[in-house]
Image (cartoon, helix red, strand yellow):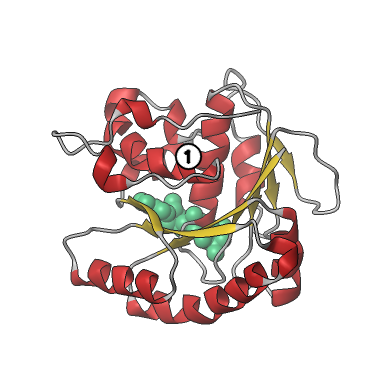
Amino acid sequence: MRNVLVVNPKGGCGKTTVATNLAGYYASKGVDCTLVDLDQQKSSYQWVKSRPGDQPEIKISTDLEESHDSKRVIYDCPAQIHLGLTTDLINRSDVIVMPINPSVIDHRAAFKFIFDVRGMIRAEVCKRIKIGLIANRANPAFNSYQELEKFARMMQTPIVTTLRSSQNYVTAAERGLSIFEMPRQKVATDLDQWKSLTYWAEGKLLRHRNDINASGKTSERVEAQITL
Ligand SMILES: Nc1ncnc2c1ncn2[C@@H]1O[C@H](COP(=O)(O)OP(=O)(O)OP(=O)(O)O)[C@@H](O)[C@H]1O
Ligand SMILES: [Mg+2]
C-alpha cells in the first residue's frame, strides 16, 4: 500500500483537482485505489459518485479511521487544516504533494505550513516522507512563476511539476472523469505535465532537464513504474 497526501491549507489551490486526477490515473492503470475525502465540502466524494459506470472503479471514503486495503490511498485534505490532523496524516503517508498557485499571497500562506511540515519530517518517525510542490494554474513565463521558484529554493522543496490552467480539468470534473479518461488528443499537453507528478507519487523525482526531448516534451520512457 502507498499513501499520497494532497495538502495545502490555502483554499482553492487545486487539492481536489490533483487528488481526483491522481486517483483517475491509478484507476486507468488498473491499480486498486481509494480516495479519502477529508473535506466537508465533499467535492472528491461527489466526483466519485458522478463517475460514469463504464469507468474503472475508484473507492471513496470520508472516514479517516476506516481501514483501506487498496494499493494506493490518496488523501484530499480540507483548506485550513490544523496541525494535529496534519501530523496524523503525515504519519500515515509515503509522499506529500502540495499544489500551490504562483502568487506571493499563496507563497506567504504556504511558508509556515511547509516550515512546520519540514519540522515533522525531520523527526525520526517520518523521515522517509518527501514533500513536493505542484505549481498549479502556472505559466513559467510570468514573474510570479520565478517568485515561486525562489520560494521553492528557499524552502528546499522541489517543484515536481507545473500544471497549466486548462479547461480540460473543469470539463473532466463535470463528467466525473480524470484527464486520463479524456480523449488523449485533447489532453496531450496536460498528460505530459502529469508525468513527473505520477513519478513523484511513486516516490521518485524526475530530473526534468535530462528527460525533456528535443520537441520540449517529456519523453515516453519516463512513464512512472508502479510497483504493487
Ligand atoms: N490547473 C487548473 N486549470 C483550470 N482550473 C483549475 C486547475 N486547477 C484547479 N482548477 C479549478 O479551480 C477550482 C479550485 O480547485 P480545487 O477545488 O481543486 O481546489 P482545492 O484546493 O481543492 O479547493 P478547497 O480548498 O476549497 O478544497 C476548481 O473549480 C477547479 O476546477
Ligand atoms: Mg478541495
| Relative vertical location of residue 33 with respect to residue 205 in this rendering, above or below | above
Q: Is mark 1 within 8 Å of ligand 1?
A: no
Task: Pick the residue in front: 57 or 149.
Answer: 149
The quadrant of the image that shows the N terminus is top right
Q: Residue furthest top?
A: 54
Residue shown at 32% from the left, 44% from the top:
167
Viewed as shown, does residue 203 lie left or right of 221?
Answer: right
The vertical placement of 210 against 188, above or below, is below
Instruction: Assess disc 1: are there few (<14), some (14-19) or many (≥20) residues with their C-alpha within 10 Å of its C-alpha.
Output: many
Residue sitting nearer the eye, 113 or 56:
113
* Image coords of residue 93 (percent x, y): 68, 53
- State which image quarter holds ligand 1: bottom left
Q: Is residue 176 visible?
A: no
Image quadrant where residue 183 sits: top left
Residue at the location (50% across, 49% down)? Answer: 18
| Element at label 1 | helix
**Which residue position is annotated with label 1?**
198
Residue situated furthest left in the rendering: 214
Compared with 203, 122 (above or below) is below
Of residues 115 and 166, the one nearer the viewer is 115
**Residue at 58% over, 38% down:** 23
Q: Residue at x 48, y 79 (%)?
A: 111
Q: Nearer the viewer, residue 59 or 157?
A: 157
Give percent across and percent down for residue 79.
59, 68
Task: Pick the quarter of the image with the C terminus.
Answer: top right
Q: Amino acid at mark 1?
A: Thr
* Residue 224 appears in the picture as rendered: yes
**Left or right, residue 118 beside residue 186:** right
Image position, residue 156 (x, y; %): 43, 70
Position of residue 223 in the picture relative to residue 34 (left or right): left
